[in-house]
Amino acid sequence: MVASACPKCASTDIDTDGARGEAVCENCGHVLEECAIVSEVTFSENAGGASSVVGSFVPESGLSSFRGGPGYGGFGKDSREVTLANGKRIIQHIAGLLRLNQHHVDVAQRFFQQAVQRNFIQGRRTHTVVAVCLYIVCRKQKTSHMLIDFAEVLQTDVYELGSVFLKFCKLLHIRLDPIDPSLYIHRFASMLEFHEKTQQVASTALRIVARMNRDWMITGRRPAGICGAGLLIAAKMHHFKRTEAQIAQVVRICDSTLRKRLNEFDDTDASAMTIAKFNSLFKTGSNSDFIDSYEAKREQDRWLWTNQCAPPILKSRRKTANAQTPSSPAPSEGSSTSTPSNAGAGGGGSGGGGGG
């Protein structure tokens, strides 16, 4: 708002030019205001008789401006504004297909604005960048959407989306938490048609996934294979006949990946437990919290790298190393027999060496 008096000479004779957005004191010539943003639109006529807009239009985003071109009321839209408008329309379309709410759309639009500002869209399809922005929002909000869902909507290669996703996260220094496989259990369980027992099967699968996490099976593996193995085991525990091909089709993995996860689970202690014993490891009404006694025991042995808590890759290496260790030579006939106390000490020493 223009001041009523000049701050230099206190004169009230202020010359205001609304077309140029300037206010000048007529007494001392002090410029009170310039380049002001006004709501009205004014035009000027050049020597050739053509009219053009005076000033510029500032959009809501503030990234660029509309340029006044020749002709009555002519506005030329900046290419960046066109890109942002197209991106917003595509975000709304993809979000509607995947049933994302308005909050996800707003956050994705801000990510897309940053991509436009940093020229990340140059040389890439707008649909691909938009899908990456929406997927980052889904990862941050921990929804049950996977990258392959966006690939199916766009009818594009999922590996291409993954490459753009990694590059965009590196550009903006975005750090995302590892994917929790339990986010997709209820989604996949509803697709396997367990009917009224869907919730029970999903709860059992969540417990199996939690136990897999205890046995280091989740680290370094994609969540779809973990979910498929957990759901297949949970379905058999509730007397449902589901084949490996059916599970693989729902979770979108190949049969060999599912069999690998099942074989890895077969190497853990939980595979030899009964259903009642397996359920007794968890707190009542919980699908992820172990009982205190079992949890305390596991926390003591977590970093001792025993066969029970070591990752599967270390288990296989340890088995190979034990198989290659030569057996101790038999005692000679002339050697004396050791006492029980000495034998116990020797056994303890070898056991300690093996544990290390």
Image (spheres, helix red, strand yellow):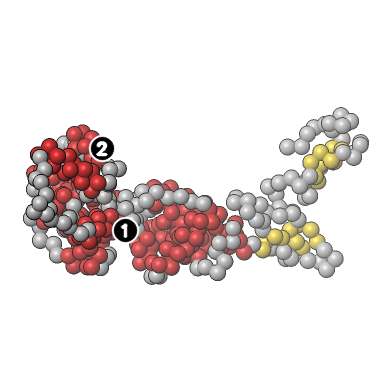
The residue carrying mark 2 is: 300
Q: Nearer the viewer, residue 283 or 322?
A: 322
Q: Earlier in the sequence, mark 2 or mark 1?
A: 1
Outermost front residue = 334
Q: Report the mark closest to the observer, 2 or 1.
A: 2
In the image: residue 267, left or right of residue 142: left
On the rendered structure, is 234 left or right of 173? left
**Alpha carbon distance from label 2 to label 1:** 28 Å
Quadrant of res 67: bottom right
Q: Position of residue 73 (x, y in %)?
A: 69, 61
For this orientation, the residue located farthest to the top is: 10
Residue at image x 39%, y 52%? 138
| Residue drawn at 48 percent across, 51 percent down | 174
Choose between 204 and 214: the one closer to the eye: 214
**Residue 123 x %, y %:** 55, 69
Q: Residue at x 20, y 64 (%)?
A: 259
Residue plotted at (79% across, 58% down) = 44
> The disc labelled 1 sits on which kind of residue?
Arg
**Dot 2 lies on which element?**
helix
Report the residue that reaches farthest toward the right: 27
The answer to which of 31 and 309 lies nearer the viewer is 309
| Residue under pointer 1 | 222
Q: How many marks?
A: 2
Counting from the top left corner in percent of width and height, residue 152 is at 35, 67
Q: The disc labelled 2 sits on which kind of residue?
A: Gln
Residue 312 visible, this angle: no
**Quadrant of the image containing the N terminus:** top right
Near mark 2 (Cα within 10 A), the count class, few <14, some 14-19 or many ≥20, is few
Is 48 placed left or right of 192 in the picture? right
